[in-house]
Image (cartoon, rainbow, N blue to C red):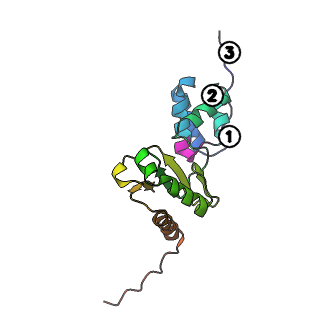
């Protein structure tokens, strides 16, 4: 005879928790649903915070250490909110030899952010990847999903500054139509 512990209450009234709970319920609150449940949380909220990790651990009756271990082992999971823009610097062999380290250093100095982190203003998340499959474009980065190659540090910083300026610039006023 197994004892069933009561499931923890939803962390808040946010309806996204109901989606997460549905994922766990569909899998019978079994521990094998851990990764799928973490994906559900991240899809709903954009990242995995401590509240989410504790809720999942309690709901699936899995130790918090195991939930945290899975969340930090797989690179697809984020423990912090993602920035408005993302820059993934390739650190594969070709890119590294051709200057990926200089790109990372430039990002660190200009944006005061380490790889794997987001700037304090939430504008930019900086990541590294072992290879983005663009060795002929080394050094390369993926900026908001677009592969950019043969990058000099100045060109990368300028591109990121333009992205943020385009995001924060006020929309131009609508033009008046000429009478027909």
Residue 142 sits in which quadrant? Answer: bottom left
Q: Is residue 142 magenta?
A: no
Which of pointers 1 and 3 indicates the residue nearer the eye? 1
In the rendered image, residue 153, in percent from the top left (x then y), is placed at 49, 62
- The residue under label 2 is 66
Q: Residues within 10 Å of mark 2 (few under 14, many from 20)?
A: few
Q: Residue at x 34, y 90 (%)?
A: 179
Residue 166 in percent (x, y) is at: 49, 70
| Disc 3: which residue | 3
User: At 56% across and 37% down in the image, what residue appears?
Assistant: 20
Q: Image height check: is 39 above or below 96?
A: above
Furthest-bottom residue in this view: 179
* Number of numbered discs on residues: 3
Q: Is residue 138 left or right of residue 25?
A: left
Residue 10 visible: yes
Report how far apart the C-alphas of labels 1 and 2 lie in the structure: 15 Å
Q: Quadrant of the C terminus?
A: bottom left
């Amino acid at each position: 005879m197994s004892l069933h512990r009561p499931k923890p209450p939803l962390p808040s009234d946010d309806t996204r928790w109901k989606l997460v709970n549905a994922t766990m319920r569909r899998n019978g609150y079994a521990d094998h649903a851990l990764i799928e449940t973490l994906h559900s949380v991240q899809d709903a909220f954009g990242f995995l915070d401590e509240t989410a990790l504790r809720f999942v651990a309690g709901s699936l009756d899995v130790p918090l250490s195991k939930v945290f271990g899975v969340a930090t082992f797989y690179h697809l999971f984020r423990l912090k909110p993602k920035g408005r823009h993302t820059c993934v610097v390739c650190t594969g062999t070709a890119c590294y030899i051709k200057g990926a380290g200089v790109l990372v250093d430039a990002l660190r100095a200009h944006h005061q952010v380490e790889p794997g982190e987001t700037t304090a203003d939430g504008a930019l998340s900086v990541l590294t990847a072992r290879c983005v499959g663009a060795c002929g474009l080394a050094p390369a980065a993926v900026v908001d999903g677009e592969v950019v190659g043969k990058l000099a540090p100045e060109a990368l910083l300028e591109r990121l500054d333009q992205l943020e300026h385009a995001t924060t610039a006020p929309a131009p006023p609508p033009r008046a139509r000429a009478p027909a």
